[in-house]
Amino acid sequence: MESIELLDLEIERKRVKESEQSSLLFKNIVESEKFEKKRNDFKPSKTKILFVGESRPSGGTFFYDKNSNLYRYTKESFENVGIDFSLAKFKEMECWLYDVCKEPIDFINSKSKKKEIINKYIPDLKNEIKLLSPKYIIVVKKTCMEKVFAAILESGYSENINTFNTSFPSCGHQNKYVDELTRILRNIL
């Protein structure tokens, strides 16, 4: 009798766990749709400068909510070249931020796992680049994004001519990002 009760208990635990996972997956899908709607609200009809990021942050901040490091330091860089930055101005200047990964991956510690996930989305990025045909592409992050940068170059873009790579503005790289992006903007605007 005890083994039947234990089996029933184990089946119930498994059912609850699957239910919780389904609920979390649904929540992530709904949340993702909310972020992507906001991103697309600021998508220009023509893209001159495509910023390519890894993914939106897992902590709930988001460039298009104006509350992320990327927003703060991108704003500073644009202001360094005399542009009164806002999301509306970013769109008006035909700039748009595209994240390679659809879900946050910044919490993943394993670089090999991050690269594996990023590489899975490279075909989507290539399609987006083909559709948008941006004049310039700025890849925001150097680590784990090597194949992304290589895929862009394979798509006919040239390093330091119309494709650039910057540090990501976190972990002490904020000033480096601002310096790099300011220099790029001075050359292409």
Image (cartoon, helix red, strand yellow):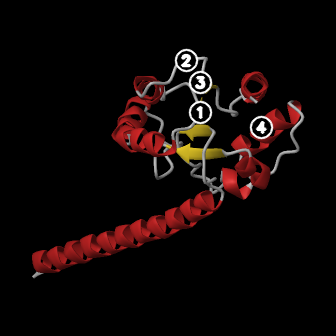
**Residue located beneath label 2 in the image:** 159
Say which element carries label 2.
loop
Give coordinates of residue 182: x percent, y percent.
78, 26
Give the labeled residue for mark 3. Answer: 162
The N terminus - image quarter: bottom left
**How far apart in space, not on screen, are marks 4 and 1 (Cα)?**
22 Å
* Mark 1 or mark 2: whose residue is earlier in sequence: 1
How far apart in space, not on screen, are marks 1 and 2 (Cα)? Answer: 13 Å
Q: Quadrant of residue 73?
A: top right
Query: Mark 3 and mark 1 in contact (Cβ < 8 Å)?
Result: yes
Kindly identify the amino acid type of the residue bearing the numbered disc 4.
Answer: Tyr
Q: Tell me the residue that label 4 is attached to.
A: 73
Is residue 23 rendered to the left or right of residue 164?
Answer: left
Q: Earlier in the sequence, mark 4 or mark 2?
A: 4
Q: Residues within 10 Å of mark 4 (few under 14, many from 20)?
A: many
Measure the alpha-carbon separation of dots 2 and 3. Answer: 6 Å
Q: Amino acid at mark 2?
A: Glu
Which numbered disc, 3 or 4, marks the residue closer to the eye? Answer: 3
Between disc 3 and disc 4, whose residue precedes? 4
For label 1, the residue is 135
In the image, what residue occupies the spot 42% across and 71% down? 26
Rendering coords of residue 17 (x, y %): 32, 69
Q: Observer-nearest residue: 159 or 16? A: 159
